[in-house]
Image (cartoon, helix red, strand yellow):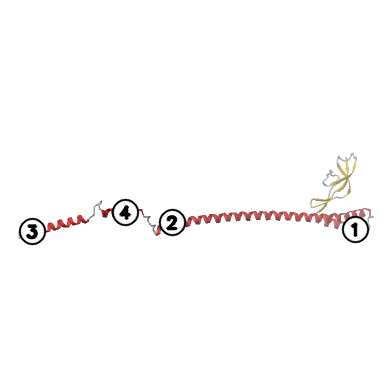
Amino acid sequence: MSEENKKTSEVQEEAGKEALESEAVKEPSEGSPETAAKEPEQKEEAEKPQKDTPEEDAKEGKSKTSFFGKKKKDKLEQQVEDLTDRLKRSMAEFDNYRKRTEKEKSSMYIIGAREIIEKILPVVDNFERGLAQAPEGDAFADGMQMIYKQLLTTLEGLGVEAIEAVGKEFNPDFHNAVMHVEDENAGENMVVEELQKGYTYKGFVVRHSMVKVAN
C-alpha cells in the first residue's frame, strides 16, 4: 500500500509541474509580440481626451452663462445710465426753457402795461392842472378831486408810483433836468422844482420827472 501511495503522489507532483509549465508558457513576456501589440492600444487610450462628466459640463455651462449674463447686465446698466443722463439733461433744459418763457411773458406783460399806463398819465396831468385852477368850495371841483384820488388809488394798486423829486439829489435814472438855476439856499445838484411828475411801474421808469436843478 505504501508503494502505491508513493506512486500516486509522484504522479500528482508531475501533473502539478506540467500545469505550472503550461501556465508559464501561456503568460506573454514583456518583449513578446502580444505585449508589443497591446502597448499601442494602451498608449492610444491614454492619449484620448477624457470626456467630461455631466457635473463638469453643468459647471462649465454655468460659468459661461454667468460670464455672458454679467456682460449683458453691464450693457443694460450702461443703457440705464445713458437714459438717466439724457432724462436729467432734458429736464434741466425744459426747466430753463420754462423759466426763460416765464421771464419773457413777464417782460411782455410789463412792457404792455407800461404802454397803457404811459397813455393814462396825460389824463392824470390834466386832472392836476384843472384842479389847480378850480376855485375852493366848488362842488364840481370837489367831485373831480374825489375822482382824481380814486384814479391815483387804482394806479397805486397796479404798482404805479410817483417819483419823488423836490428836495432830492438829481438822479438821471429818474429825473430829466430841463432847467438849471443858481440858488444859494439849495445844495449843489439838488432838485428845486418839479415841472412834470414822473412815474414808475413795478420798479421800471414809465416817465422821468421833468425838474429844475440848482447848480
The reply, left or right, for residue 42 in relation to residue 205 is left
Q: Is residue 113 left or right of residue 44?
A: right
Q: Where residue 174 sits in the image (x, y, percent)?
A: 83, 47
- Residue 50 locus on image (x, y percent): 37, 56
The percent coordinates of residue 103 (x first, y second) are 74, 54
Whether pointer 3 and pointer 4 mark residues with C-beta atoms closer than 8 Å, the reply is: no
Mark 1 or mark 4: name the one nearer the start of the chain. 4
Label 4 sits on residue? 40
Q: Which residue is mark 1?
A: 144
Quarter occupied by residue 177 = top right
* Kind of residue at disc 1: Met
10 Å crowding of disc 1: few (<14), some (14-19), many (20+): some
38 or 215: nearer the viewer: 38
Give the Cα distance between marks 1 and 2: 102 Å
Separation (CA) of disc 1 from disc 3: 173 Å
Dot 2: element? helix
Could you tell me which quadrant the N terminus lies in?
bottom left
The residue indicated by pointer 2 is 60
Q: Is 105 placed left or right of 138 in the picture? A: left
Helix, strand or loop status at disc 3: helix
